[in-house]
């Protein structure tokens, strides 16, 4: 099971709290998923924030606040400070968005914000790309977890660059790695775990499914399957067939 | 005085941030605050006086991915 900044988490599934059809479905989906971590945001208090905070507290999971929607270092750092006080945690999922259409991270601003926050005692979970040098700079900045995207947030496209994600895993064998964003199907989540990732963070794939509770369970099972498969050392793919049934002892019939 | 509270112009009495939060019904609510784009820790709200035109943000826990 994943260990983030010295804290053991009971499940490799990290689940977002947005876009559910109702608070009750959100709570049921969390129970069905056994997720160990819930991501949340900070937004202007319009009257519903207090009840939502109680709902999240009652889930009994570890809370990971995000800086979603931030486009600059300043915005992200200020949001992180507000989140640390509000949620009473040094953990922050650091998002600094660089492009409106793809919501891809501004990796230059991300590295700078990560450096500032780490120096200030935060434990940063950077939403990043799978670029090796960017990830190296994030580690140099003090990050002890990396969260590369699978595909753009909410796109449900799965792992766009399995080669890059595999390469990242091989490059940083001891760093906890999380595929964050882009998951659409349980098979995508299983693939991330088969690649040796420590956890998967997803939201839309569950919250916007026709039956979020059933999809939450499906994701949990897929993640468990992928994790088991990784430990079981899968065979290498090959181009030519290799008969699994022995030829020895076969009768001559033709 | 007139301030921008969570993006909307609003007339408040104040004079401190803590006074304004109480005035708008958030006196006992759990919120995080920022004044003119800078984080304002909870412990400084009573000692921080607002000026005309200040932008105050009061945030709370919301859905997030």
Image (cartoon, coloured by chain):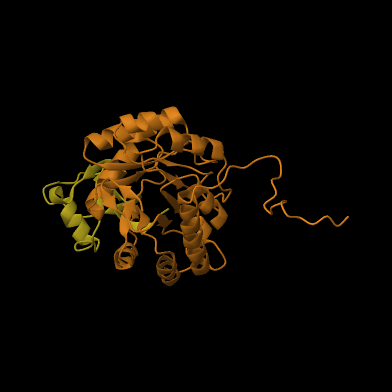
Chain colours: A orange, B yellow
Which picture quadrant has residue A174?
top left
Q: Is residue B35 above or below residue A98?
A: below
Q: Residue A139: percent from the left, percent from the top? A: 33, 33
Name the side, left or right, on which A23 lies relative to A211: left
Q: Is residue A142 above or below residue B45?
A: above
Which picture quadrant has residue A81?
top left
Q: Is residue B1 visible?
A: no
**Outermost residue to the right:** A254
Nearer to us in this view, A207 or A82: A207
Q: Is residue A132 visible?
A: yes
Q: Residue A5: percent from the left, percent from the top? A: 27, 45
Instruction: Give me the residue at 39% from left, 35% from top.
Output: A172
Name the side, left or right, on which B41 lies relative to A77: left
Nearer to us in this view, A110 or A247: A247
Name the side, left or right, on which A244 lies relative to A161: right
Instruction: Give me the residue at 71% from left, 45% from top.
Output: A241
Q: Residue A123: percent from the left, percent from the top? A: 27, 43
**Outermost residue to the left:** B47
């Amino acid at each position: 099971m994943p260990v983030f900044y010295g804290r053991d988490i009971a499940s490799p599934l990290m689940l977002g709290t947005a876009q559910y059809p109702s608070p009750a479905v959100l709570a049921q989906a969390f129970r069905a998923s056994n997720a160990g971590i819930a991501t949340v945001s900070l937004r202007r208090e319009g009257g519903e924030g207090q009840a939502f905070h109680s709902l999240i507290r009652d889930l009994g999971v570890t809370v990971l606040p995000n800086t979603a929607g931030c486009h600059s270092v300043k915005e992200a750092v200020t949001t992180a400070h507000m989140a640390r006080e509000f949620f009473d945690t040094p953990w922050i999922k650091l998002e600094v968005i660089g492009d409106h259409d793809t919501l891809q991270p501004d990796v230059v601003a991300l590295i700078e914000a990560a450096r500032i926050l780490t120096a200030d005692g935060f434990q940063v979970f950077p939403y990043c790309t799978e670029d090796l040098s960017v990830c190296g700079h994030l580690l140099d900045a003090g990050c002890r977890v990396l969260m590369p995207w699978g595909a753009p947030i909410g796109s449900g496209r799965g792992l766009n660059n399995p080669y890059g994600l595999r390469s990242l895993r091989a490059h940083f064998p001891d760093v906890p790695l999380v595929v964050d964003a882009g998951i659409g199907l349980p098979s995508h989540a299983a693939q991330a775990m088969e690649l040796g990732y420590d956890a998967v963070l997803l939201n839309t794939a569950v919250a916007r499914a026709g039956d979020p509770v059933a999809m939450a369970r499906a994701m949990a099972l897929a993640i468990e399957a992928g994790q088991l498969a990784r430990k079981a050392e899968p065979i290498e793919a090959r181009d030519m067939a290799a008969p699994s049934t022995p030829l020895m002892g076969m009768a001559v019939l033709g | 005085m007139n301030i921008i509270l969570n993006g909307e112009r609003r007339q408040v009495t104040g004079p401190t941030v803590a006074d304004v939060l109480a005035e708008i019904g958030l006196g006992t609510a759990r919120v995080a605050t920022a004044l003119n784009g800078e984080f304002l820790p909870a412990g400084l709200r009573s000692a921080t006086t607002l000026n005309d035109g200040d932008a105050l943000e009061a945030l709370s826990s919301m859905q997030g991915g």
